[in-house]
Amino acid sequence: MNKTWLVAKREFLSRVQKKTFLLTTILLPLVIFGFYALIIYFTVKSTDDFKVAVVDNANIFGGKIASKDDISFVFVKDESFESLKAKVSKKEFDGYVFVDSNFNASTNDSLVFVSGKTVGVMTRTDIQKRINNALENQRLLSSLNISKKTLDSLQRGNDIKFSTLDGKAEDDSKASASLIVGYISGFLIYIVLFIYGAMVMRGVMEEKTTRIAEVIISSVKPFQLMMGKITGIGAVGLVQFLIWICLTLFLRVLLPLLIPGMADVTQPGAAQALETAKGSGLLTAIFSSITFSTVCLFIFYFLGGYLLYSSLFAAVGSVVNEDPQEAQSLMLPITMPIIFSIVIMQSAVNNPTGGLAVFGSLFPLTSPIVMMARLPFGVPSTVPYWQLIVSMALLVGGFLSTTWLSAKIYRVGILMYGKKVSWKEMSKWAFRKR
């Protein structure tokens, strides 16, 4: 155990102390957010209010067009084409809509919007939407003597509440929050398995191609070397991952303070969506879904999945020489279960009690991703205790089994050079009695 710790410490420090680690971990996110901030800054500075003059001689708008955000409509009277053009040229208005007294809205006549500058696609769509909404509202009033607001209230359906047999209510916000938390948790583990598993494989390949492993093997057992590399490289990846999360959260909080109005540019309607989420209880439900037990289980499946797959990646790295294509062909049987996990997870978040979701949450190669998609829906209401215990036990057993088999492959492959190895030959090494 002491030698395993020494190998892990060496792997961790040798990578963390490199300049490339600092550049990719700290400088790269700062550069990306710097460019992001500059784009937002110039976008905010170049965003002006768009003022539109409306001459409604046919009274098709009823003197009202909704003005929101950066677009405002001003109704004017006793204006001609020439006077409107003059005011647009003097930049009193950015554009105008002139409705002749003979205009007939029921025949779908076209309206002409005249502007003094090129109108962007989003602004054009917004203007068109507001004018059409105003016309629709006036048609409803003139034809049916009913407002659009009243019509929308008549078309609104009744709320349907869901409940279980024991009388426990299940609202939409809780179901949506469980889906969001489950999907994000499963996807995070999916990313970690791919990125840091491949990092372990490259670390093993590096020592083999530089023949450093020949020297280390003389004083450390192959199993201790493999476990040390898995632990050390995994710790590097976890530290990098945590730094990225902290930097992202910090910069996301800092940018709106430095650039007022950023949310209006980057995410139109974000404030309305946030208010809707608050009103529906979605944000509260999301935070209530992230309990202490959920966090602990996330850490367990995170570590279990990483250790299981990193041992397999280490075994592949030990048999690969210097040909990258050889590594890609050997990685396929390892990456396929990870990809299948994402496919099963998409089914599990929609039907967490289905047969496919239960199987995926018990099978060790898919359980780290699929089980995390089911857990936010509730234990034991959705995930019975026996399924959770069996899943955790199988994951631990799967890690021990893959580590034992990978160690046997690692012991032979780390000292083999100049030969292209297949999975058939690797299986012989794994199950050979010694």
Image (spheres, helix red, strand yellow):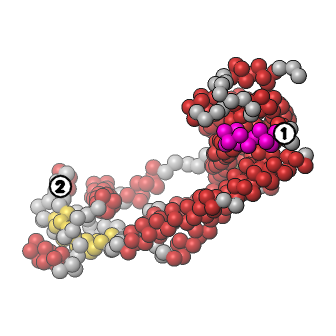
Dividing the picture into quarters, in which one does residue 215 lie?
top right
Left or right position of 405 against 192: right
Q: Is residue 336 visible?
A: no
Looking at the rendered structure, which numbered label has been put on residue 218?
1
The structure residue drawn at horizontal position 75% and vertical position 57%, both measured from the top left corner, is 13
Q: Residues within 10 Å of mark 2 (few under 14, many from 20)?
A: few
Give the camera-side residue of 73 and 364: 364
301 versus 123 height, above or below: above
In the rendered image, the residue lying farthest to the right is 1
* Residue at figure coordinates x 72%, y 37% from the top left: 314
Query: Is 65 displayed left or right of 360 in the figure?
Result: left
In front here: 314 or 48? Answer: 314
Query: In the structure shown, which secondary structural element does the residue marked by tag 1 occupy?
Result: loop
Q: Which mark is residue 164?
A: none
Vertical order, 241 against 352 (above or below): below
Which of pointers 1 and 2 lies earlier in the amino acid sequence?
Answer: 2
User: Please, which residue is most extreme toward the left here?
Assistant: 82
Q: CA distance from mark 1 to mark 2?
A: 86 Å
Task: Locate residue 281 relative to residue 299 in the image: left or right.
Answer: left
Q: Position of residue 112 (x, y in %)?
A: 17, 61
**Residue type at the position of mark 2:** Ser
Q: Residue at x 70, y 19 (%)?
A: 424
How many neighbours does mark 1 have within 10 angstroms: few (below 14), some (14-19), or many (20 or more)?
Answer: few
- The residue identified by callout 2 is 110
What stretch of residues is rendered in magenta?
A: 205-218
